[in-house]
């Protein structure tokens, strides 16, 4: 499934050497296996910047954002002085993207020691299988956070746009519903299917969970062995994501930032590193892999580019001032810190070796969490988790430890 030759992937970041090339159906960087983790991250930085710049250039050429958003344009015609019109200016959106994208992509989580080691395939087949089982608990729940965030944008939501609140809410719902359709495999349903659709077509979808379980086929992990109890760090990350997305303790703009900017931009990097490690392991162990086995990893790499652009547009429409920008940064900091702690917990569980927590890093001040709402919310949320979900539940649910470094 690989071919040899000179790497010819996009970007001019360096860090490549001649080696096996991947087919386009597997990864957009044919020379993925010749890159370092830093080079993978840098290439995505460059690619995402280029994608956003191209998207905004097309907006300018087409007369701005409003021609692309006819429903919002119609609402603005009834209230032309509404601040959402200013928020929709392409130059403003692009400046906001540049600032927030740099903030997210420079966080240390995207090249966490776990991802580095996994990408090098410095693990056994059993260790890789152990990771996939534990990480499945994370994958099962991420998409529900998008649904929670979508539910925050309703007709009674406290948005700052007065008579345009409902129009803005509707636009955000459409963006998040698009993400959910991809996650649940429900996009592209015919509107005129009528009574001819069978029940199995209604309820059986190729969700991301179904695609993820195809990874187990590569490593011959039996269905009965795939679902395991939660590691405390994975449970914490699931709860943090759900709290940011769905709890009234956090603003709507924080919910949107948590499921968009804090997830979509960095995921292509980490899924690429996981993909590379599995392909190296398969080559070493003589495992016959096909694009179907790694479809969930390949698909995220491509899909999340589109998701990130859509969610960035929706987020930018909500930003009124620097306080909103800071709220977005803080929400992403909470999310990235929780993911870092999860990956450190996975490192210890998978490899049986110590791994530094985020609190042991010399974490830059800009990545420290600015308030403690999330700490109290997380501790309380732990107590509502059924005792059979997390081993040593009593210790975990009563612990004062939280996966954040506070400012």
Image (spheres, rainbow, N blue to C red):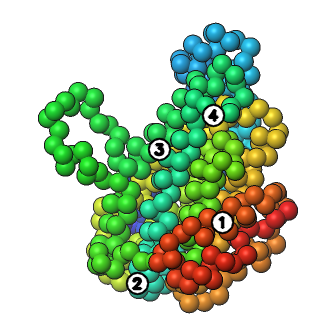
Q: Is residue 130 above or below residue 315?
A: below
Toward the viewer: 243 or 288?
243
1 or 2: tag closer to the N-terminus: 2
Residue highlighted by disc 4: 157
Give the numbered dot on residue 125: 2
Toward the viewer: 352 or 94?
352
Give the numbered dot on residue 380: 1
| Quadrant the N terminus occupies | bottom left
- Mark 2 is surrounded, within 10 Å at the Cα level, by few (under 14), some (14 to 19) or many (20 or more) other residues, namely some
Instruction: Say which residue appears at 34% left-offset and 80% top-offset.
Output: 225
Residue highlighted by disc 3: 179
- x, y (%) of residue 32? 50, 63
Using the rendered view, name the quadrant where residue 278 is placed.
Answer: bottom left
Secondary structure category for the residue under label 3: helix
Dots 2, 3 in contact, CB < 8 A = no
2 or 4: tag closer to the N-terminus: 2
């Amino acid at each position: 499934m690989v071919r040899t030759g000179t790497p010819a992937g996009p970007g001019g970041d360096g860090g490549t050497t001649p080696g096996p090339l991947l087919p386009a159906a597997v990864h957009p960087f044919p020379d993925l296996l010749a890159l370092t983790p830093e080079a993978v991250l840098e290439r995505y930085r460059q690619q995402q910047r280029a994608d956003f710049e191209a998207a905004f250039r097309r907006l300018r050429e087409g007369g701005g954002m409003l021609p692309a958003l006819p429903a919002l344009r119609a609402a603005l015609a009834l209230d032309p002085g509404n601040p959402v019109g200013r928020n929709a200016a392409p130059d403003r959106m692009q400046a906001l993207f540049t600032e927030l994208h740099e903030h997210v992509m420079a966080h240390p989580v995207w090249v966490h020691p776990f991802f580095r080691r996994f990408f090098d395939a410095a693990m056994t087949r059993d260790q890789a299988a152990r990771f996939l089982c534990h990480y499945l608990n994370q994958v099962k729940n991420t998409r529900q956070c998008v649904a929670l965030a979508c539910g925050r944008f309703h007709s009674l939501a406290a948005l700052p746009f007065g008579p345009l609140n409902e129009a803005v809410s509707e636009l955000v719902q459409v963006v998040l519903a698009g993400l959910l359709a991809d996650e649940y495999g429900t996009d592209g349903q015919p509107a005129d299917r009528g009574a001819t659709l069978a029940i199995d077509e209604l309820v059986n979808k190729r969700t991301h969970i179904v695609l993820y379980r195809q990874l187990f086929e590569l490593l011959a992990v039996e269905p009965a062995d795939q679902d395991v109890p939660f590691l405390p760090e994975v449970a914490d990350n699931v709860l943090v994501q759900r709290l940011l997305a769905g709890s009234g303790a956090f603003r709507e703009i924080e919910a949107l930032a948590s499921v968009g900017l804090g997830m979509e931009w960095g995921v292509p990097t980490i899924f690429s590193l996981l993909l590379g490690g599995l392909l190296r392991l398969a080559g070493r162990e003589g495992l016959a892999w096909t694009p179907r086995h790694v479809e969930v990893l390949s698909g995220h790499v491509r899909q999340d580019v589109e998701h990130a652009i859509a969610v960035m547009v929706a987020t930018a429409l909500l930003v009124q001032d620097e306080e909103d920008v800071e709220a977005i940064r803080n929400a992403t900091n909470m999310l990235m810190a929780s993911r870092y702690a999860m990956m450190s917990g996975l490192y210890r569980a998978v490899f049986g070796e110590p791994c530094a927590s985020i609190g042991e890093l010399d974490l830059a001040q800009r990545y420290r969490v600015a308030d403690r709402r999330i700490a109290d919310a997380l501790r309380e949320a732990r107590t509502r988790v059924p005792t059979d979900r997390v081993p040593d539940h009593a210790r975990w649910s009563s612990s004062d430890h939280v996966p954040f470094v506070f400012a």
